[in-house]
Amino acid sequence: MVELVAGLIDVFADAPLTGNPLAVVQGADELSDDAMRRIAGEFNQAETTFVMRSARADWKLRSFTASGAEVFGAGHNALGAWLWLGEHGDLGSLETARTFQQEIGPDVLRIELEAIDGRVHGRMRQAPLRLSEPLDDVAPLAAALGLDHADILREPKPRPADTGAAHLMVRVLDAGAVDRARPDAAKLLAVLETTAAEGCYIYAFDADAPDTAYTRFFNPTVGLWEDAATGTAAGPLAAYLAATGNLGNNELAIEQGTKMGRRSILRIRLTPEPELSGAGIVVLRGVIRL
């Protein structure tokens, strides 16, 4: 019998049972891909991250959705795993900020961790912005999202943006339009297949809060219907807004998950690459026996 330490952490949360839950499994070096997919299905969370040894970095991370699709990029799947390790003392003292390296797919990315007021906070650098061709015909997109054509704004254009994972950035009229979206999975999947994007990030701004975006995220390509906090979408959103002159400064706060009852606040700072920051709360720790 093999025993592995595992549990749940609510990422981007200030209180238990808010934010975006992540399952974490430590010591996963000997697990097969099939075993990791089955464990992710057992947890049935948006993502499960497996922590293993690395020859290129301090740790290697692999993440799978509940449906078994492997996902990449430095988002809540990566930040949550490091917060988990830090909260349990597996990274040594964090009373002063320390920098670590993480292997995620082909990338080795930096993350900085520090204990502040008794909680571990992380700051994680993503890859430089990569843009794909914009989506010129928004009619199929509007139909796929269950919105009116006029709800989708054309500045900046709906476009796949990538700082580790490519997602379609779609600006809509206001927060009401964000909440009114009722995506059709088959139609949205058909739209995404015409682009380089994996998921769809819809967002809006309040004129009184231009540095805070209100968002929802859908990703039918990996069987993830709606996500409460998506760092791999938040980073490219801030970078894309800056590249198109639509970000007033180098920082953006993003509210996501509110419609799901899992309000999350993601903070992005451009350095010039997006730097995602946040904390989390461990809500479950136990042992998996295989």
Image (cartoon, rainbow, N blue to C red):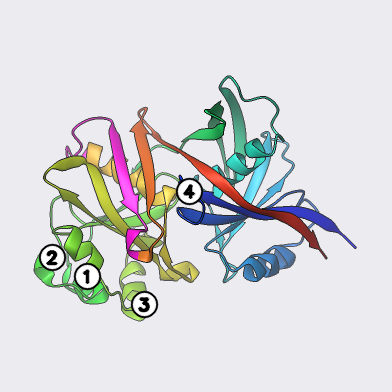
Q: Residue at 51% x, 34% y: name it.
A: 122
Whether tag 3 and tag 2 are in contact, CB under 8 A, the answer is: no
What residue is disc 3 on? 185
Magenta residue span: 243-259
Front residue (pair 256, 162): 256
What residue is disc 1 on? 180
| Distance in Å between CA atoms under marks 3 and 2 | 19 Å
Amino acid type at circle 2 is Asp
| Distance in Å between CA atoms under marks 3 and 1 | 15 Å
What residue is disc 2 on? 151
Callout 4 secondary element:
loop
Callout 3 secondary element:
helix
Q: Which mark is residue 15?
A: 4
Quarter of the rendering occupied by the N terminus: bottom right
Residue 22 image point, x, y percent: 56, 55
Describe residue 82's horizontal placement relative to residue 35 as left or right: left
| Distance in Å between CA atoms under marks 3 and 4 | 31 Å
Amino acid type at circle 3 is Ala
Q: Which of marks 3 and 4 is in front?
A: 4
Q: How crowded is mark 4: few (under 14 residues within 10 Å), some or many (20 or more)?
A: few
Residue 31 versus residue 276 in the image, above or below: below
Between discs 4 and 2, the one toward the N terminus: 4
